[in-house]
Amino acid sequence: MIELREYQKEATEKLTRLCVDHGYGYLSGECRTGKTLVALSVVKNMDEDKVLIITKKKAISSIKKDIDLMNLVDKVVVTNFEQLKNFEGTSWNIVIVDEAHSVGAFPKPSQRQQNILKLRYGIIILMSGTPSPESWSQLYHQFALTNVWSEYSRYGRNGFYRWAGDYVEIKEKRVGTGIVVKDYSDAYVNVIKRDIEPFMVYMTQKEAGFSQEIEENVHLVKMSKRTYRLALRIIKTGVIGKSKGRSVLADTGVKVMSKLKQLFNGHVITERHGTVIFDKSKVEYIRDTFKGKTAIMYCYKAEEKMLKKVFGDRVTEDAVEFNSNDDKVFIGQVKSSREGVNLSSADDVVFLGIDYSALSYLQGRERASYLGRDRSNKVHYIFAEKSIEPKVFEVVQSKENYTINHYRGHRAAISEEANRQIRKRGVDGDQVDYVQQSWIA
């Protein structure tokens, strides 16, 4: 049995009261403050069985451990968002939605949100450390799982658009090839706060007594000459190779950004022949630089392949195994590992490149935080020297996604820097590892 800390007891009491009085509540707790323990404590307070927790796949093992410690194994079932469709039509006394912001897509509801609405439940608890990471409009479909927006039907097809008339300053923006669409992201924060605040329960790391600081370090790695040459082609023409060969096509700004993200990590996805890995400079730098207990975040499958090849049997993708074994190196895809994954035993959390999402930055850097940690939480970013990555880092640090508009402002500088790298570097050993063995370099 776990003994709750005082701030957790206070949060449990408030959340229990909301569930009794209204049938729902939103627990907004910063990373590692113990949201799951508080939600499970509410279950115990209300003495309910038939409880369903919906979470990310990577978090299931950790949550099951908490369920066992709280002696609730016979009452609580855990599933992930991808498997939720198998529960359609089932009845539950309490449904707990972990990482609830992931059902906040707008203007149209996400499939995740629709799958939750296909459950039958009496009480629902929403939980997230970042309820509205990109826009306060993300709160609409989360709270549509409750009856906060009571003037609109929970199942109303046009609920968001009707809601936006009162809660959003609707603008226009250009997307893709210049198509003009309505932009619903500029919500009236004060109006939304007014309506949801009575149903919110907060927990902060300061209240919890966290004392360690996050120490961020940027490492600039010189990539192979080939990397800069390929990046420059994508920037200038959007094309690498010929259409019938191992070609790469980036005919929109968004595709250019995606290809640059790949190229500066030493690989690229081609049009017809899958992925080509050509530069292991970053992965080898990580191997040679970090000698302590290391957790590594990556974005693409090719990066996973490189990491497994370099670190061999030391690699694990299980956070529990990593925390209990000093010889293991954890690797995890950033979007699936940024939430609900406990890497508290890591000496260093290393990002192989950087995602364009501010949420990946904000949540990923917290993976090694835990109450009682007696040393700095060291987070490292491995960037290609003279690339787009340091510029992305500056943007996401300000809690803003890196967008096509940012890229357009940086395009000329990135192009010039890549050109300089090509001119100043001599002939280097181009590293080539074709994923499909039938290819010939």
Image (cartoon, rainbow, N blue to C red):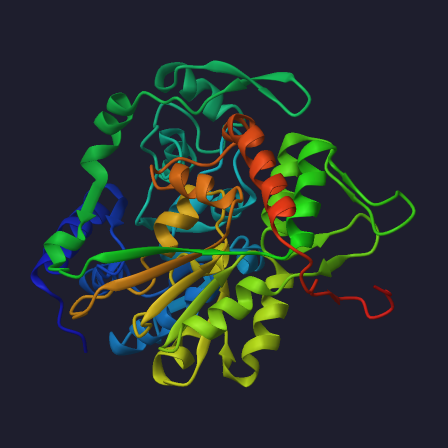
Give the answer, above or below, for where 437 lies relative to 170: below
Tell me if 248 is positioned left or right of 287 in this view.
right
- Along the line of sight, which residue is nearer the eye, 319 or 2? 319
Give the answer, above or below, for where 71 lies relative to 152: below
Image spot of residue 136 (x, y percent): 35, 30
> Residue at the spot x=87%, y=68% of the render?
438
- Quadrant of the image for the C terminus? bottom right
Which quadrant of the view contains residue 194? Answer: top left
Give the answer, above or below, for where 401 lies relative to 437: above
Give the answer, above or below, for where 248 lies relative to 184: below
Tell me if 246 is positioned left or right of 224 in this view.
right
- Quadrant of the image for the N terminus? bottom left
- Along the line of sight, which residue is nearer the eye, 406 or 330? 406
Tell me if 4 is positioned left or right of 267 in this view.
left
Image spot of residue 116 (x, y percent): 48, 48
Q: Is residue 262 visible?
A: yes
> Residue at the spot x=45%, y=18% of the render?
162
Q: Is residue 61 visible?
A: no
Which quadrant of the view contains residue 86? Answer: bottom right
